[in-house]
Amino acid sequence: MANILIVDDDATFCLMLKKLLERHKFRVTTSFSPQKVKSIVKQQFYDVVLTDLRMPDISGMEIIRLIKRESPETQTIMMTEYADIATAIQSIRQGAFNYIPKPFQPEEVINIIREALEAKVSPVDNRPNNLLQNDFLFGTSKISLHLKGYVELVSPTSLSVLITGESGTGKEYIARLIHNLSQRNVKPFVAVDCGAIPTELVASEFFGHIKGSFTGAISDKTGHFEQANGGTLFLDEVGNLSYSTQIQLLRTLQERSIKPVGSNYEIPVDVRIIAATNENLQLAQEQGNFRDDLFHRLNEFEIKMPPLREREDDILLFAHHFLAQANSSLNKDVQGFEPEVEAVFRNYAWPGNLREMKNVVKRATLLSSGRRIGLNEISPEIYRTQQKDEQFRLFNETSESELIQKVLETVNYNKSKAARLLKIDRKTLYNKLKLYQIEIP
Ligand SMILES: Nc1ncnc2c1ncn2[C@@H]1O[C@H](COP(=O)(O)OP(=O)(O)OP(=O)(O)O)[C@@H](O)[C@H]1O
């Protein structure tokens, strides 16, 4: 029986959710006092922790970081108001398994917990590559055809590829595709989340160790480089690597060999590196946080993943693709979307990109009882945002700084929302606030 912990300062909600989960045969503990979570997870192992995002003294984001530190095998799910979706997406970057917008239907939360239990928690992921075959869609917009051209060009080479782009744009999917289209496809594709490895274990994780080389090294361990030998090593969130790990990594790439921790021998390795980042790695490099030499070694070929809002001609194609996937996983037969939903989808900014769209469509499919998905099955936040968006287009004739000021006031100075409405990312918004000296009260 799986152990679930619910963390929410709203006691009534906690107890209702507890009852629901217990009816589905989960063993449930609740904590209305988020500060106590640390001692709770120390006493017992939890398979899944569901945490609210906004709580008075500690944020859900901190809870996720804490669980990651104290109990790395536990899956976390962020519960959030739809308006907080951009922050929820950040929580996935911090290591959450997924997020679920509140209010949710009982089936939704049960489904997401089951998915979390099925997914193996490990910084390494060597799922079989044929996973992609039915799942992957390129799109037909001009920008997608460009992307396809680049992928076909670079895949058969041995060049290191740096994939950049916002969260949820499909960086890992493209990395798997590049591997599948290369001659290395008969060997493993090993995906490593560089942000999820504790600093003290980095060397052993990448290069392996021999039994007894440090406390806790109870048997020999094969590192990621050796696991990926002959294949591809995917370094996700590569911007999170510490400076000292960057040095070790560079050395390995230059020497093409590794030395397991505690050993005195070298093992030759032949690994193609594909790295991905949400951050501006070039900026990190210019600011001295990311090594120049490693940056150039990883960036032999760059692929920029476009945000979904820039793939206008692909939006409905992806929506139908995700609908087909949702029908098959939920055993439903929803035929399509009402025209007003299609219009909403085309206008929405999709800050969480393909990942968000997949979640929205899956949820709508689950809720739908008709042949087509209507507005009732879509969270109002999506079309409210769209309406505001249309209003804001009217302001375009005024200066940019006035527009930003206006948007900020309307969303009560919530920067994530403002950035979304302005169709810029948060970093760009920060730069513009600085540029126009706009103060946030
Ligand atoms: N080309 C695609 N075709 C179909 N589904 C896709 C495609 N690209 C991405 N997806 C869907 O979107 C989800 C997010 O993709 P992926 O994990 O590759 O994004 P990412 O850019 O690596 O995100 P992050 O930076 O947050 O790790 C995938 O799990 C998949 O369901």
Image (cartoon, helix red, strand yellow):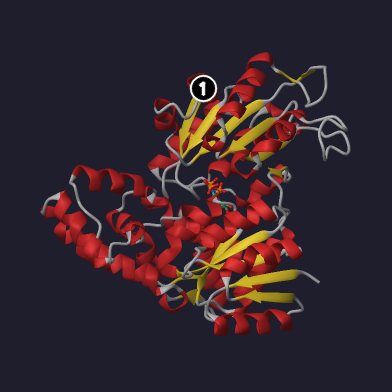
Toward which corner of the image does residue 113 lie, by quadrant?
Answer: bottom right
Locate residue 213 relative to residue 360 in the image: left or right: right
Q: Give the x, y percent position of residue 352.
A: 46, 55
351 lies above or below 195: below
Q: Give the x, y percent position of residue 385.
A: 32, 66
Locate residue 271 relative to residue 378 in the image: left or right: right
Q: Residue furthest left?
A: 398
**Label 1: how many Cα within 10 Å (few below 14, some 14–19, many 20+):** few
Instruction: State the quadrant of the N terminus.
Output: bottom right
Q: Give the x, y percent position of residue 148.
A: 50, 36
Q: Residue furthest top?
A: 255
Front in this rendered view, residue 419 or 186: 419
Locate residue 206 relative to residue 285 in the image: left or right: right
Q: Residue at point 77% right, 28% down? A: 226
21 lies above or below 389: below
Camera sees residue 177: no
Q: Which residue is mark 1?
A: 300
Residue type, label 1: Glu
Secondary structure beneath dot 1 equals loop
Toward which corner of the image does residue 65 lie, by quadrant?
Answer: bottom right
Q: Residue at point 62% right, 73% down? A: 109
Instruction: State the quadrant of the C terminus.
Output: bottom left
Camera sees residue 37: yes
